């Protein structure tokens, strides 16, 4: 699933300052970034649901085709034996 990158604090004073600045920038840019993350996340979830649906439909169609093929074979055998 799509998630925003994790912030990690580096070693020393520089790491603490960088971590603090990154947190501020993230909070200030959230209004712009979050809707795009949410849109991308929703799009990926829709794709996943579609793929699952199509796999189920494909399995159903495969089973139905197998049954029809078997039925056709039985009818052909019956037709040959009646001739």
Image: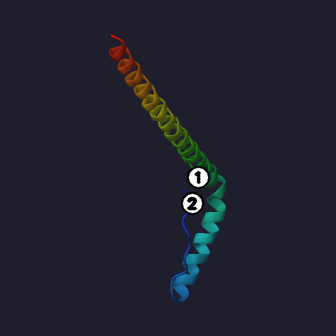
Dot 1 or dot 2: first in sequence order is 2
Q: Residue at x 49, y 40 (%)?
A: 55
Location of residue 51 with respect to 26 vertically, above or below: above
Q: Which residue is mark 1?
A: 37
**Image marks 1 and 2: residues in contact by CB distance under 8 Å:** yes
Measuring from the top left, give residue 71's x and y in whole percent: 44, 24
Residue beneath disc 2: 3
Q: Nearer the viewer, residue 38 or 52?
A: 52
Count up the numbered dots.
2
| Mark 1 burial class by Cα count in 10 Å: few <14, some 14-19, many 20+ | some
The residue tagged with tag 1: helix, strand or loop? helix
79 left or right of 33 in image: left
Residue 20: where, in percent of width, then height?
61, 76
Distance between the alpha carbons at the discs numbered 1 and 2: 8 Å
Q: Residue furthest front?
A: 82
Which residue appears farthest toward the top when viewing the image? 83
Depth order, front residue of 4/25: 4
**Residue 68 locus on image (x, y percent):** 45, 25
In terms of image quadrants, where is residue 73?
top left
Quarter of the rendering occupied by the N terminus: bottom right
Relative placement, left or right, of 7 versus 28 is: left
Residue 62 x %, y %: 45, 34
* Residue drawn at the location 62% of the way across and 50% of the way down: 38
* Residue at position x 58%, y 70% in the image: 22
Residue 80, label in figure: none
Picture residue at 36% right of the left edge, 21% below the top: 77
SS for dot 2:
loop
Is 12 above or below relative to 36?
A: below
């Amino acid at each position: 699933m799509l998630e925003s990158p994790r912030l990690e604090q580096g070693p020393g004073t520089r790491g603490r300052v960088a971590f603090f600045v990154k947190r501020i920038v993230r909070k200030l840019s959230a209004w712009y970034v979050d809707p795009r993350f949410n849109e991308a996340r929703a799009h990926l979830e829709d794709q996943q649901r579609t793929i699952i649906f199509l796999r189920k439909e494909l399995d159903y169609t495969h089973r139905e085709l197998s049954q029809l093929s078997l039925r056709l074979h039985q009818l052909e055998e019956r037709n040959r034996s009646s001739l």
